[in-house]
Image: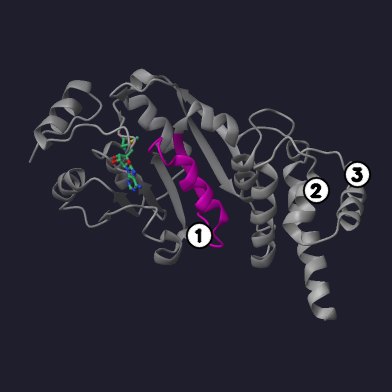
Amino acid sequence: MLPVKLTSPSSARSILSQLGVHPSKKLGQNFLIDRNIAEIIIAAADLTGRDRALEIGPGLGVLTERLAASAESVTAIEIDAKLCAYLQERFREQPSVNLICGDILRLDPGGRFDLAQMKVVSNLPYSSGSRILMEFAMMMNRPACVVVTVQQEVADRMVAAEGSGDYGLLTIWLQTAYDVRAVKSVSPTCFWPVPVVQSCVVKMVRRPDALSGPEKKVFSRITKRCFSHRRKQVYRMLAAGSGLDNATVVELLGNMGLSPKARPSDISVEQWITLAQEIAGVAELAVRRT
Ligand code: SAM
C-alpha cells in the first residue's frame, strides 16, 4: 500500500509519480493539497451519517476519505484508469466507498442512481465542470445538494444577477433548479499542479420543482436559443424558438412587465421560468384545439 498524506504537496507528487500519472489538462487534473480547503468543502455539505455522497473525479481521494468518514456511503466516479486502480486498492477495506471507473458524462447518473437522495461533493474537472452542472440541474431527480470547486470565472457565472455580464445560460439553468451561493475563494497554490486561475467553492441547495417535464423542454429550448444571440431583442428569438407569432410573444412579455426590446440578460430567472410555463401552456392549448 502506498503512503497516504495527500495534503502534503510532495506526497501527492510522489504518489502520482509512482502511479505514472502525468497530470492531464484535458482531464482537469489539479489535485487539492490544502487540508483547510478540504475541510471547508466537507463542512459546506453538512453531511450526516445518513447521507449518501456522490463524488465526481476523486483523483487521489483527498475528499473521498473525508466523505467516507462523514457520510453513510460514497459513490466516486473517476475517469483515469490509473487513479481508479489506486483508489480501488486504497479503499478496498471500506465497503461504504463504491468506486466506479468511468466518465460521468457517459454514465447516465440520473438513470443509474437515486440522485435526488444524494449530495454531490466534488472538485470538478475544469474542462467539463459547467457541462456536468448543467446536466445535473436539468434532471428531474437532481441531487439535493451540490458542493463543488470550480474556476472563479465559472463561479461568477453561477451566482450572477440579471443584467450583469456574467449572467447567462449557466446562471439561469442552475438558479432555476438551485439556490446558489459562493462559499470560499481558493488560491491556485492549494492545488498541484498549480492552475493559472483562482478557484471557488460553491454550494447549491435544491429548489422545489418550478417546471414540469414539458415545461423544462420549452425552458431549455428558448434559453439556449436566446442566449446564443444575447445582443438580440428577445421577442424575435422567442417567436422563432417557440413557434408562436411575434404578436403573441410581445403580449406575453408585456403581461410580465417586459419590453419587447428586452435582451436575454435583462430577464430574471423567475421571469424565464414564467415564460417557459406560459409558452408551454399556449402550445398545449393549441394542440388541444386541433
Ligand atoms: N478530487 C480530487 C482532488 O480534489 O484532488 C481531484 C480533482 S481534479 C480537479 C478532477 C478529477 O476529475 C481528476 O481526478 C480527473 O481525472 C477526474 N475527471 C476528469 N474528467 C472526468 C469525467 N468526465 N468523469 C469522471 N472523472 C473525471
Q: Which residue is mark 3?
A: 257
**Three-letter residue code for mark 1:** Ala
Q: Position of residue 234 (x, y in %)?
A: 79, 44
- Asked if one can make out residue 104 in the rendered structure from this viewpoint, the answer is yes
**Three-letter residue code for mark 2:** Arg
Q: Which mark is residue 236?
A: 2
Q: Position of residue 124 (x, y in %)?
A: 40, 39
Please tell me which of labels 3 and 1 falls first in the chain. 1
State if disc 1 and disc 2 touch (CB < 8 Å).
Answer: no
Q: Which residue is mark 1?
A: 116
* Mark-to-mark CA distance, 3 and 1: 35 Å
* Mark-to-mark CA distance, 2 and 3: 17 Å
| Of marks 3 and 1, the one in the foreground | 3
Q: Secondary structure at mark 3?
A: loop
Describe residue 86's horizontal placement relative to residue 46 as left or right.
left
Q: At x 35% / y 45%, what residue is drawn? A: 70
| Of marks 2 and 1, the one in the foreground | 2
**Three-letter residue code for mark 3:** Gly
Q: Position of residue 231 (x, y in %)?
A: 73, 34
Above or below, comparing residue 203 to residue 219 in the picture = above
Q: At x 89% / y 41%, what residue is drawn? A: 259
Task: Examine the structure image and report whether residue 138 is included in the region drawn in magenta.
Answer: yes
Q: Quadrant of ligand 1?
A: top left
The part of the image, by quadrant, that contains residue 114 is bottom left
Q: Residues within 10 Å of mark 3 (few under 14, many from 20)?
A: few
Model colouring: one colour
Describe residue 259's horizontal placement relative to residue 204 as left or right.
right
Please tell me which of labels 2 and 1 falls first in the chain. 1
| Residue numbers of the magenta segment | 125-149
Q: Which mark is residue 186?
A: none
Q: Secondary structure at mark 1?
A: helix
